[in-house]
Image: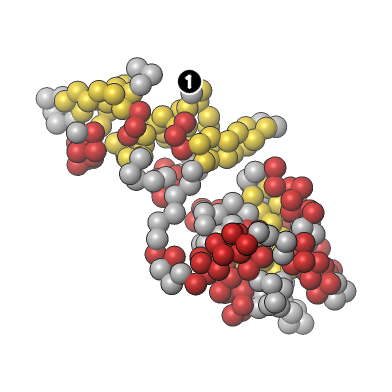
């Protein structure tokens, strides 16, 4: 660590979350963001190259997840780790891994301040080396299959170019965390700054953009049919053409969605 700055790296596969965390951290004068990574493999390379003091590391990432990133750093200079995730069930694993801190999305201002303060104190007291060496040791006990998978991902030069889509969405709903598999989702529509996810006869409301959700979902299974609607192709049972060039989709549950003329090329997905 330089005398005045904490060199920080951000790792998250969700562009919106990455941008939000960056904006908040830029308010701290002692923070210097040296790299941003969108997946685990890229993170391993950048950590080795940049040797940051502190990494805010998302746990849930396709391919090489946050814990896998730490395992892949065995034998390398280890930064302080703050795990970040939307899913509370990882809290115990993160604390048992002896990470510096653990933050649940959406990141609260006070929790972020606490994490930065803890990092500053740990670096000043030179406690980082011993703390992170224990982190490495605790996460080093993985199976041969896991080790081979991590090695495969790290050495795959085309990995960052391959599309990785989420198989589940997790988000807070009051005091609980809701987890939906991709197959459960019937359709998604926009309501202002929020998205309404319809699944199993229930509607779940989350704060995310339509574009961000579309990037996370496999286009072979989910298609944009309207400026403010995405549909699970597998849930469509009927397709009714309209005189003005639009179509009406009838889903398994009887819901009717409009497919606008702007997205008429999507019709081929249902034929």
Q: Residue furthest bottom?
A: 3
Q: Residue at x 25, y 23 (%)?
A: 238
Q: Residue at x 53, y 69 (%)?
A: 154
- Label 1: how many residues lie within 10 Å, few (<14), some (14-19) or many (20+)? few
| Residue located beneath label 1 in the image | 201
Q: Residue furthest right?
A: 125
**Do we see residue 245 in this rendering?**
yes
Image coords of residue 33 (percent x, y): 61, 71
Above or below, comparing residue 31 to residue 56 in the picture: below
Relative to 245, 2 lies left or right: right
Q: Residue at x 70, y 77 (%)?
A: 75
Q: Residue at x 44, y 34 (%)?
A: 183
User: Which quadrant is the N terminus positioned in?
Assistant: bottom right
Depth check: give the residue in front, 4 or 155.
Answer: 155
Image coords of residue 72 (percent x, y): 63, 68
**Do we see residue 31 in this rendering?**
no
User: Which quadrant is the C terminus positioned in?
Assistant: top left
């Amino acid at each position: 660590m330089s005398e005045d700055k904490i060199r920080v790296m951000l790792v998250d596969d969700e562009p919106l979350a990455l941008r939000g965390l960056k904006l908040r951290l830029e308010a701290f004068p002692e923070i210097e963001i040296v790299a941003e990574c969108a997946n685990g493999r890229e993170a391993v390379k950048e950590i080795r190259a940049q040797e940051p003091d502190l990494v805010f590391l998302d746990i849930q990432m396709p391919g090489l997840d946050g814990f896998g990133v730490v395992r892949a750093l065995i034998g390398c200079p280890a930064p302080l780790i703050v795990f970040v995730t939307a899913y509370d069930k990882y809290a115990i694993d993160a604390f048992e891994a002896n990470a510096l801190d653990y933050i649940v999305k959406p990141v609260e201002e006070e929790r972020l301040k606490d994490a930065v303060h803890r990092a500053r104190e740990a670096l000043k007291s030179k406690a980082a080396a011993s703390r992170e060496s224990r982190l490495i040791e605790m996460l080093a006990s993985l199976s041969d299959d896991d080790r081979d998978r991590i090695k495969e991902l790290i050495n795959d030069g085309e990995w960052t170019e391959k599309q990785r889509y989420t198989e589940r969405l997790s988000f807070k709903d009051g005091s609980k965390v809701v987890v939906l598999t991709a197959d459960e989702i019937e359709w998604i529509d926009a309501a202002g700054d929020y998205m309404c996810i319809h699944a199993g006869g229930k509607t779940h409301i989350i704060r995310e953009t339509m574009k961000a959700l579309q990037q996370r979902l496999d286009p072979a299974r989910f298609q944009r049919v309207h400026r403010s609607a995405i549909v699970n192709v597998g849930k469509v049972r009927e397709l009714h053409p309209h005189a003005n060039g639009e179509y009406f989709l009838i889903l398994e549950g009887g819901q009717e969605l409009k497919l606008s003329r702007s997205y008429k090329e999507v019709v081929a997905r249902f034929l």
